Image: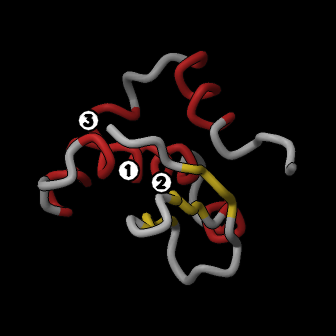
Amino acid sequence: MEKYKHIVDNKIDCFGEIDEKKKIVKINKKMNKKGKRGELINSILHEELHLLHPRMKEKGIKALTIKIVDRLSRQEKIKYYNLYNRPKK
């Protein structure tokens, strides 16, 4: 799998998206905060699953996200959150 940059972009009009040309995964933290509890980890995991399974359809990614997110340990969730909490360079 190719290396992608993970950034917070509160200007996108969705919870998260992947720019394959620029190799960037974007998460809108503001939009996720407006949602119910746990929405941010769902969005992060959802986008990561798109990277791992690029041919899987959206319906399959959504189902897999739901299946996996509740099984993540606290440390695993922290690892995903930290992808988007790096200091700006």
Residues tagged 1 and 2 counted as in contact (Cβ below 8 A): yes
Q: How crowded is mark 3: few (under 14 residues within 10 Å), some or many (20 or more)?
A: few
Q: What residue type is labelled 2?
A: Ser
Q: Is mark 2 on a helix, strand or loop?
A: helix
Residue highlighted by disc 3: 67
Q: Nearer the viewer, mark 3 or mark 2?
A: 2
Q: Which of 30 and 79 is in front in this view?
A: 79
Q: Nearer the viewer, residue 2 or 44?
A: 2
Which residue is labeled 2 in the image?
43
Q: What residue type is labelled 3?
A: Lys
Distance from the alpha carbon under mark 3 to that under mark 1: 11 Å
Q: Where is residue 50 in the image (x, y as percent from the top left)?
A: 30, 52
Q: Is mark 3 on a helix, strand or loop?
A: helix
Please tell me which residue is depicted at 60% across the width and 50% down the height of the picture.
6
Name the spot of residue 66 as percent of width and height, x first: 30, 43
The residue at 49%/48% (across/down) is 4
Distance, label 1 to label 2, CA atoms, is: 5 Å
In the rendered structure, which amino acid carries the disc numbered 1?
A: His
Point out residue 58 in the picture as x, y percentages from the top left corner.
Answer: 20, 63
Q: Which of marks 3 and 2 is nearer the N terminus?
A: 2
Res. 70 image quadrant: top left
Q: Distance between the residues labelled 3 and 2?
A: 13 Å
- Residue 68 percent across, percent down from the top left: 31, 31
User: What numbered label is drawn on residue 46?
Assistant: 1
The kind of secondary structure element at disc 1 is helix
